[in-house]
Amino acid sequence: MKSKLNLILLVSALLFINFGELLAQRTIGPPALQDFAACADLSFNSFTVIAELNPGDPLPSDNQFILQLSDPNGSFDDPDAIQPLATVTGPNNGSGSTLEIEFPDFSIPQNANSDTYKLRVITTTDPVIISELSDDTAMHFFRNDLDLFLNEREDAIFCNVTTFTKTLTIRLEDLDDNDVPADTFEWEWFKDGALIVGETSPSLVVTDVGRYFARIPLGNCQNFFTFEETNRVDVSLIDVSSVFIETPAADFSFCPNEIKVLNSSEQSSAFDYQWIKDGVELEGEISPTITLPNNEFAGDYEVRVTFSDDCELVAGPVTVVNEGSSITQPLPENLILLPTQTIDLEIMTDAPDGSTVRWFVETSLQSQSILSGGTTSFEAQFVGRYRVEIDALDPCDSFLFSETELFAPTGFNILIGTQDGNACESDTFTLELLEMTGQTVGGLDVPLTEEQLTFFDFEWFRDGVSTGDTTTSIEVSSTDIDATYTLVANLRTGEFTNISSNELVLSLIPPGTVIQADPLVLTEDGSVTLSVPLNATYTYQWFRVVDGENVSLDGETNNTLVVTEQGEYFVTIMSALCELSVPPISIGTQGITEIIPNIITPNGDNVNDNWFLPASLVNQQDVQVTIYNRNGQVDFMGVSYQNNWPFENSKSSGQDPIYYYIITKNNSVLRKGSITVMR
């Protein structure tokens, strides 16, 4: 029995040894990618590799073939650098012919970026069968959801220099406009199409003119992708003499009725332009070409051309001559004719003496004369349309005209207010007649002239009771809080009486107003209500600070604002007398970040005149505020701070440009910093 058992064990051992030898004898050829290269992106990442399994006996039925990727240099020496790409089961049957091991539709890693990867196949048998290594295989994954910005897609242009240094920087954004760090990629730089050897960072210092761009090196996949290169940036030097003003006309002398065009010699939508006349920028004239108006076009013209942040040139000046004439002071557009009044209509012109002047009422010629002294006038006694025409004796034979219409009033409007922008901080201020208009049958409001105001008697009323003041202005004390003022006028000829102005409520905005928040913390899917005191005579406008810019929130004109997003907010409060911007408040998920301003502008405009602290630090007995000048001397020290430095309590009257502060509570420092005084 024992001999039989030994025989069985011996046979089993021989069979095991023989099976292992058979496994060792079966081999796998080098795997081959079924494309010239594996070029993958976010929208496509599917590839196939095939390896040949040489003839031999069957492998275990549960054997799997694993496709492995080497390190970027083609080495499998470091086990941690080997990456499995795909796994398939079989073919595990025995065969007298070569079989294919196919790894279909696998994805390459998103960090793949080399032309010298190698592939191999291993089995899960024991011992392991390892295939021959593949040829060098290019695999590159590229994020095609990126926008590449070189120098913010602007050319670098220099002028008035012989040498320069400029750093070109790459910036990346994804499709959601989120910044992507450029230093997570390796880069190649090119100048005039030639590779700049050794430059691999996302920035490049240039000192020569040329066309530059950068790209992410992607080896054999380089031409497969379309967004791996930046824009081209031209670095150039501008010849100052090449920038000048020209005109298609024979010279810069024009008649008023001619087309008058000035051109910049440099014309490109990539540049910024600003035309200047007699030293003053012309609003809206920001193209390389300007067409001059028919009147008042004579003068010295320049054009400022901004080629880049590093180059701005002013071309000109050229002197434009008006060979014709113009009306330099035309008739007002519309006028009110009061009962019993006559109006002396007058124009001024630069037409030569001796020119013919004609005055019309409607279409009827009323007078014809010869111009003398550059002015002509006509006494208007009736409502209607008046027109003056001039046949100018100038080289252009200019024909000039101006017209207006006189209306009989059907009623009057009076607007009162104050022109003092700092009225909220004044002890006394002046209410005055800002404008008086006459109404017409057609619904026009035509302003009265200063002379026409003398045709009326005026009287001021406070809360419906006469003050005894009969001029067009009145001095008012800030102690008269919530009093209502009106101005009443009577036309002396009696046709219009008891003409009442708007009601002006004397309501001052407290300078220490702060924004309150409820609750203090913005929770997920929650909101915070911001508020300032309500006053029916105030108007409100809320703002949000975005990237340093104050953005008006449309429709938010109440004393409260419901906030659902983190950010910095403030409100401007306006009364009939003044305007106050309340210090901002920052809302976040960790509670209110109280902002302590580091700049004040004490210029008396009621905006940022004093140093305002957040509500939690104002009027607190246990909070001490100490302000030092730049020499370390105490300029102010006290508790229960009232937002009144420097106007009320600065030893130096806030005349220094820089101060420093320390805020303590119960002898513990809460905040410290600097204050810049700008005037």
Image (cartoon, rainbow, N blue to C red):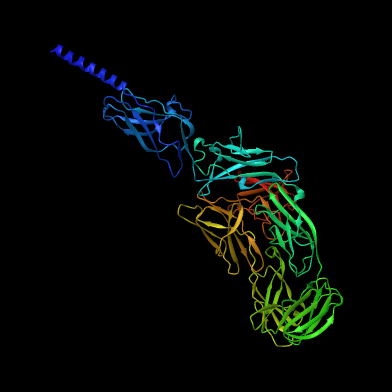
- The foreground one among 20 and 592 is 20
Image: 125 above or below 298:
above
- Residue 351 position by quadrant: bottom right
Q: Residue 289, image x and y in percent? A: 70, 59
- Residue 125 position by quadrant: top left
> Outermost residue, front direction?
97
Image: 437 above or below 153:
below
- The foreground one among 457 and 169 is 169
Quarter of the figure that contains the N terminus: top left
Q: Residue 592, image x and y in percent? A: 54, 51
Q: Is residue 236 left or right of residue 250?
A: left
Image: 97 above or below 151:
above
Q: Residue at x 20, y 16 (%)?
A: 11
Quarter of the figure that contains the C terminus: bottom right
Q: Residue 66, image x and y in percent? A: 36, 31
- The foreground one among 404 and 467 is 404
Q: Residue 342, image x and y in percent? A: 78, 85
Residue 678 in view of the camera: no
Q: Residue at x 14, y 13 (%)?
A: 4
Image: 640 above or below 29:
below
> Outermost residue, left direction?
1
Q: Is residue 338 left or right of residue 39?
A: right
- The foreground one among 205 and 496 is 205
Residue 291 in view of the camera: yes
Q: How many marks?
A: 0
> Outermost residue, top direction?
3
